[in-house]
Amino acid sequence: MTAYFHEEFETMPRAALEALQLKRLQNTVTRVYEKVPFYRESLSKAGIRPEQIRSLDDLRRLPFTVKQDMRDAYPYNLFAAPMDDIVRIHASSGTTGKPTVVGYTRKDIDIWADLMARTFVATGVHKGDIIHNAYGYGLFTGGLGAHYGAERLGASVIPISGGNTARQLLIMQDFGSTVLTCTPSYSLYMAEEAREAGIDFRDLKLRVGIFGAEPWSEDMRRDIEAKLNLHALDIYGLSEIMGPGVAIECIEAKNGLHIWEDHFLAEIIDPESGEVLPDGATGELVITTITKEGIPLLRYRTRDITSLNRETCVCGRTHARLARMSGRSDDMLIIRGVNVFPSQIESILMRIEGVEPHYLLVVDRHDNLDTLEVQVEVNETLFSDEVKVLQALALRIEKEIKDFLGVTSKVRLVEPKTIARSEGKAKRVIDNRRK
Ligand code: DLL
């Protein structure tokens, strides 16, 4: 029997859901038109007045919002509520320039806690669970987002945040944690430290892991599930839209992430032309928030690459599912004209015996030609093997990458623990061409 947190909303028939979406979209467009000069201007430029939004199809007429708009509005110019009503501020670090700042009203925090509680329930988590929350607490939304959801659900939350892995393991053992929340890469780091400390995950009480904040692959899921002895589920979110809990895989299907459509409208567009693509087609995810007060966003281009599936799920939820993110359009590497996502290389690596889930892609340009070096760790046994064996393995991986992705690479097998471990979002790519 599927458990729900908000059964009425989670299983709402499409027609009722769409009626609710339209009403909320109309309110949001009115709100930003009245309160945010940026939107008043961009809507006026597009020739749209709020009362012209009469059906969900009118969504397409609205202008996009992009990350640069948020940077230009730094720090508060996109806020649609007075600062007096903002009770929390988060920001995403970003790799270049100023961070992207978001503000939440009390109601926004309340809805976020509800949606995170809903998210937990979809993964089979319930009151009575002990949630070991190793997402970072701070400006990053992961820690506090999961924390409030856990409390809203009535579970016990351990606000451990990231770092000090030895202590994490000790607490997990002694406190009887049943749920782990952190990035997938950090969960693998924990597995590695546990093995070295002689801790067997089969002796722990962990049952569910809720992993996200960075791309990962189906093959990595299998690896994590085997090493940590739990169900590993994919959680998606971004600070601009809310934080964690925008979309989640349900434990019943483990196949696609339900995006909470009573609060977010999802579209997939062709990242080049901006044209809306049909369900099932892969493209860039665009999200419109329809209940936010602090910083509502119209058609925000997430740059995340996925597809939409609106078929009803075995879990009974009617909310559309997003395919596992293959990466961000700005993480896509173009190597000698071939498009490659780091996650595609990850999938190939993960299928090879003896190869560890720790890798780094180094892209460079020599004599006007792009080069790709794949550094990947192999296990102790393999590493101490003869050079010949290692060379043959490197060649085999190069061949698989060439055969599957059409790109030439140089594979460098490295000793265990050579590649930096991450307690948060892993860094998988160094692109020296961007320097
Ligand atoms: O990463 C929020 C979050 C916290 C999500 C904890 C899940 C768990 P930001 O730091 O703003 O927010 O980064 C958002 O991370 O646009 C994606 O590119 C990436 N991302 C998040 N979840 C996933 C996922 C948080 N499940 C950016 N798969 C997003 C792939 C993800 N990428």
Image: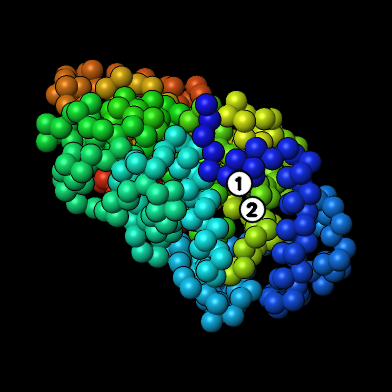
The foreground one among 45 and 108 is: 108
- Residue under label 1: 260
Classify residue 322 by image quadrant. top right
Query: Could you tell me which residue is drawn at 88 percent across and 63 percent down?
Result: 52
Give neighbour class at mark 1: few <14, some 14-19, many 20+ (Cα, 10 Å).
Answer: many
Give neighbour class at mark 2: few <14, some 14-19, many 20+ (Cα, 10 Å).
Answer: many
Q: Check whether the beta carbons of the residues at disc 1 and disc 2 lie within 8 A of each other.
A: yes
Q: Position of residue 328 (x, y in %)?
A: 53, 47
Name the quadrant of the C terminus: bottom left
What colour scheme was applied to this rendering of the protein? rainbow
Q: Position of residue 336 (x, y in %)?
A: 53, 39
Query: Could you tell me which residue is drawn at 22 percent across and 32 percent down?
Result: 204
Query: Could you tell me which residue is drawn at 74 percent across and 76 percent down?
Result: 34
Check disc 1 and report its element: helix, strand or loop.
loop
Check disc 2 and report its element: helix, strand or loop.
loop
Kind of residue at disc 1? Trp
**Spatial separation of the CA atoms under disc 1 and disc 2:** 6 Å
Q: Position of residue 354 (x, y in %)?
A: 27, 22
246 sits left or right of 432 in the view: right
